[in-house]
């Protein structure tokens, strides 16, 4: 309870980023938005016609008689009804066929992006967070982070997908369509973002208890800013600069943190949980569940099960001084 209150008291709300197909930030998103509006107006026209038809039929058959009127044969009326129904069926079939063709064409446009020199990013879905890897033939030039995907604007990006456990679905609606991540199966897709900004994403395939808290952010920035971020991410963790941060690092390396997380430049090298080498540079923690503030991090360390029940992270019982030292150390990991 104390941990939860600590989080609520100090956590500041952050802008989660755009999260709608109606605010596309990439050509693929624009194609999908166009198809959405085509289908919307078709469905709207059908709805209006049906309401008008029901209204006309109700007004025409309305009667004040106490008893039901006798049924008369009306061959001409039956013929007109057959013609009307047949026409409606034909129009429906043609409309559905047109929508099918437009869907196929839109799908090809959304997937029809190639480049000889794209930015390659590997996304691995876990219960319930996203591992983000920028592969490089040189192992020491590989960047590994979690839940925040940095990309340069106006640059083709190829996403390689995998799942470490169950089926997940990668969906950033302002950028492109959904992509399922299947265990034991790899796939790839492309996108290119034209407008800088933060674009909210979400797992779109039910994957367990905390499926709703498996979000991510795509942060589109200028090429220069992206390269500067990438160079910063390649650096090992900074050395403690005072007694408190030195104690915080010692707490990290002598408690359960060491068993699940990596901090490059230290003895912590487990890949079970997210890489924390530059955790202080991230906007959110726990797969976009909490803002990356001192209070939220403290609550997450002490009792993550109260905040995100079912998460793989276990509660950590730390003395107050050890907790504050650990928080101070984590805040230096920019």
Image (cartoon, helix red, strand yellow):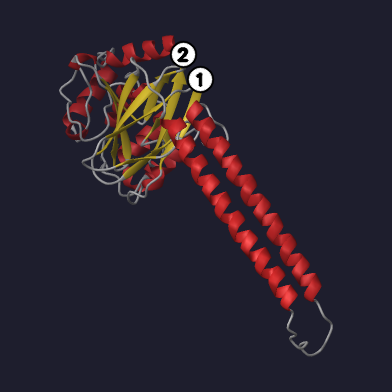
17 and 117: which is toward the camera: 117
**262 and 192: which one is in front?**
192
Q: Which image quarter holds the C terminus?
A: top left
| Element type at mark 1 | loop
Q: CA distance from mark 1 to mark 2?
A: 7 Å
Q: Is residue 196 left or right of residue 61?
A: left
The picture places residue 7, in percent across and down from the top left corner, at: 42, 38
Is residue 17 in sight in this rendering? no
Q: Quadrant of residue 184?
A: top left
| The furthest residue to the bottom | 67
Badge count: 2
In this image, 103 relative to 39: left or right? left
Q: Quadrant of residue 152?
A: top left
Marks 2 and 1: in contact by CB < 8 Å? yes
User: For this rendering, which residue is in front, 309 or 75?
Assistant: 75
Q: Which residue is mark 1?
A: 196
Name the residue located 32 percent from the left edge and 42 percent from the top edge.
Answer: 128
Left or right of 158 on screen, residue 247: left
Determine if residue 275 is in view. yes
SS for callout 2:
loop
Q: Position of residue 307 (x, y in %)?
A: 38, 45
Q: From the viewer's perspective, is residue 229 above or below residue 291? A: above
Q: Where residue 222 is drawn, which disc sits there?
A: 2
Please identify the residue farthest to the right as the structure is shown. 64
- How packed is label 2: few (under 14 Cα within 10 Å), some, or many (20 or more)? some
Q: Earlier in the sequence, mark 1 or mark 2?
A: 1
């Amino acid at each position: 309870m104390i941990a939860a209150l600590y989080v609520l008291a100090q956590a500041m709300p952050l802008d989660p980023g755009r999260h709608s197909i109606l605010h596309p930030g990439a050509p693929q998103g624009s194609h999908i938005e166009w198809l959405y509006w085509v289908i919307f107006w078709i469905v709207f026209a059908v709805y209006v016609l049906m309401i008008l038809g029901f209204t006309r039929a109700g007004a025409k058959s309305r009667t004040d008689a106490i008893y039901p009127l006798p049924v008369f044969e009306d061959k001409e009326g039956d013929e007109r009804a057959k013609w009307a129904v047949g026409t409606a069926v034909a129009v429906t079939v043609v409309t559905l066929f047109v929508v099918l063709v437009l869907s196929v064409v839109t799908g090809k446009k959304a997937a029809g992006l190639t480049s000889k020199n794209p930015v390659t990013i590997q996304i691995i879905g876990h219960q319930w967070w996203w591992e983000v890897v920028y592969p490089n033939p040189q192992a020491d030039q590989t960047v590994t982070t979690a839940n925040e995907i940095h990309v340069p604007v106006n640059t083709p990006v190829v996403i390689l997908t995998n799942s470490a456990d169950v089926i997940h679905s990668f969906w950033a609606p302002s950028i492109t369509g959904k992509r399922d991540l299947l265990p034991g199966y790899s796939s790839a897709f492309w996108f290119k973002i034209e407008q800088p900004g933060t674009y909210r994403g979400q797992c779109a395939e039910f994957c367990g208890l905390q499926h709703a808290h498996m979000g991510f952010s795509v942060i589109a920035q200028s090429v220069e800013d992206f390269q500067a971020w990438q160079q910063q991410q390649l650096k090992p963790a900074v050395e403690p600069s005072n007694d408190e941060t030195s104690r915080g690092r010692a707490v990290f390396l002598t408690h359960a943190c060491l068993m699940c997380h990596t901090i490059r430049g230290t003895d912590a090298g487990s890949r079970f949980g997210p890489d924390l080498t530059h955790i202080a540079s991230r906007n959110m923690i726990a797969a976009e569940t909490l803002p990356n503030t001192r209070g939220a991090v403290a609550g997450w360390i002490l009792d993550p099960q109260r905040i995100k029940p079912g998460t793989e992270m276990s509660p950590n019982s730390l003395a107050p001084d050890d907790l504050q030292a650990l928080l101070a150390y984590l805040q230096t990991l920019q």
